[in-house]
Structure formats: C-alpha cells, structure tokens
Amino acid sequence: MLLQVQKINLVMNDVEIHTIYVDGGFASNTVFIDMLELMMPDFTIIPSEMPLGTSLGAAMILSNKK
C-alpha cells in the first residue's frame, strides 16, 4: 500500500488534486479503498462502479479515430 501512495504522490507533482478515482480490480476491494482513505486523508477516494471503465474509455476513443 505504501508503494501506491508513494507513486500517487510522485505523479501528482505540484498539481492540486482533491479526488482520486480507483478503477479496475482494486475498485471492488474494500480493504484497499479503506487503507487508501486512511493513508491519504486529504483526498476523496471514489471507487469506480464500472470496473473496466478505463478500458471502455480507451476503446471509445480508438473507435472515433479516423
């Protein structure tokens, strides 16, 4: 879990972010979500209700390319 928090902080750089969306298999892992909320109390953590949302979004973008 510490590695995930370190990587989130690394990619945020100096960008002001208040919400983290969790997608994929971890979105339904309540232990992961609870731990992430405990380790990142300044953020709103929102698990996706659609576990393959990122894949769907990528497919939609690719289908619109000409």
Image: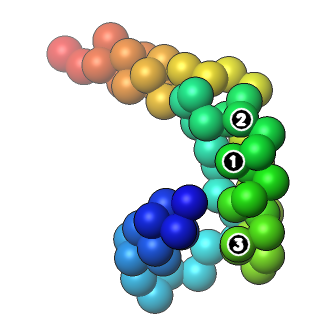
Is 59 placed above or below 48 here? above
Q: Given contact means CB atoms under 8 Å apart, are the residues at marks 3 and 2 in contact?
A: no
Image mark for residue 65: none
Q: Nearer the viewer, residue 60 or 1?
A: 1
Q: Amino acid at mark 1?
A: Phe
Determine whether, in the image, residue 58 is placed left or right of residue 27: left
Q: Which residue is mark 1?
A: 32
Q: Position of residue 51 (x, y in %)?
A: 62, 23
Q: Position of residue 20 (x, y in %)?
A: 65, 58
User: Residue 34 appears in which quarter of the rendering?
Assistant: bottom right
Question: Dot 2: few (<14), some (14–19), or many (≥20) neighbours within 10 Å?
Answer: few
Q: Nearer the viewer, residue 11 or 58?
A: 11
Image mark for residue 39: 3
Which of disc 2 and disc 3 is earlier in sequence? 2
Q: Amino acid at mark 2?
A: Asn
Can residue 23 be seen here? The reply is: yes
Q: Secondary structure at mark 1?
A: helix
- Looking at the picture, the colour scheme in use is rainbow
Q: Which residue is mark 2?
A: 29
**What residue is shown at x 69% (from left), y 47% (from top)?**
32
**What residue is shown at x 72% (from left), y 30% (from top)?**
28
Is 46 placed above or below 38 here? above
Q: Amino acid at mark 3?
A: Met
Q: Position of residue 24 (x, y in %)?
A: 55, 29
**What residue is shown at x 79% (from left), y 40% (from top)?**
30
